[in-house]
Amino acid sequence: MPGATDQPEANDCTAVDLAFQCVCSNGLSPNASQYSQTIPYFLCTESNNQCVEKCGQNSACASACRSDHPCGAQDPIRVNLTSTTSTMAAAATATSDADPGVYTGYGGAAATSSSRVGQSGATALAVGLGQTYGLAVVVGGFFGGFALLL
């Protein structure tokens, strides 16, 4: 997480009620609803399992238990966006607009995020050029090496 060290302010979980607290050294907390395999995910999964058990042999009821209460990240915010464009300038603009996403809150419009640190349009353009022409240079080097051997 940008601006955070390897020493979190809080990283606790109470085994009795599974209450947890995760606060990075910069004071921000990751939005747990954007991830799977978290404590809320496992609580939701167990609740769905208990609902299915209560349904018995009624498959419509069991299906409703899981479809009405989905668990895990349903629509996570995509941090790494990939788009194909005809010019490198457009590609640099498209990729530099994406926010890397450090979130506080429980998702939706109320969640706040920190902005990307150190990423400029020139950096994105340089990375795009490297991706585009880097492979051509490597392949050209192989062909040149084989040409010298012949």
Image: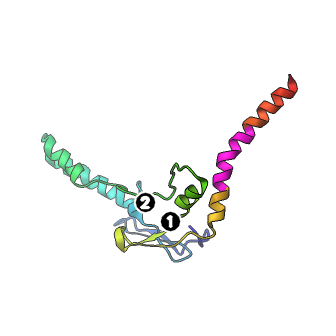
Cβ–Cβ under 8 Å for marks 1 and 2: yes
Q: Main secondary structure of the magenta part?
A: helix
Q: Is residue 79 left or right of residue 149?
A: left
The disc, 1 or 2, on the residue closer to the chain's N-terminal end is 2
Where in the figure is residue 10, as x and y percent of width and height?
Answer: 50, 73
The three-letter code of the residue at mark 2 reads Ile
Marking on residue 4: none
Quadrant, the N terminus:
bottom right
Residue at the outermost left position: 58
Residue 146 versus residue 95 in the image, above or below? above
Report the residue marked by disc 2. Answer: 77
Instruction: Judge the density around disc 2: few (<14), some (14-19), many (≥20) Cα neighbours within 10 Å.
Output: some
Marks 1 and 2 sit apart, C-alpha to C-alpha, by 9 Å
Q: Residue at x 18, y 49 (%)?
A: 64
Label 2: which secondary element: loop
The three-letter code of the residue at mark 1 reads Asp
Report the residue marked by disc 1. Answer: 99
Range covered by the magenta-colored residues: 127-138
Where in the figure is residue 118, as x and y percent of width and height?
Answer: 63, 69
Where in the figure is residue 61, as x and y percent of width and height?
Answer: 14, 46
Q: Residue at x 63, y 53 (%)?
A: 128
Where in the figure is residue 38, as x and y percent of width and height?
Answer: 41, 58
Q: Is residue 53 something that shows in the picture?
A: no
Residue 57 versus residue 80 in the image, above or below? above
Q: Is residue 145 left or right of residue 71?
A: right
Q: Residue at x 64, y 58 (%)?
A: 125
Label 1: which secondary element: loop
Near-viewer residue (45 or 100)? 100
Residue 135 falls in image quadrant: top right
Q: Per the image, is 20 magenta?
A: no
Q: Residue at x 66, y 64 (%)?
A: 122
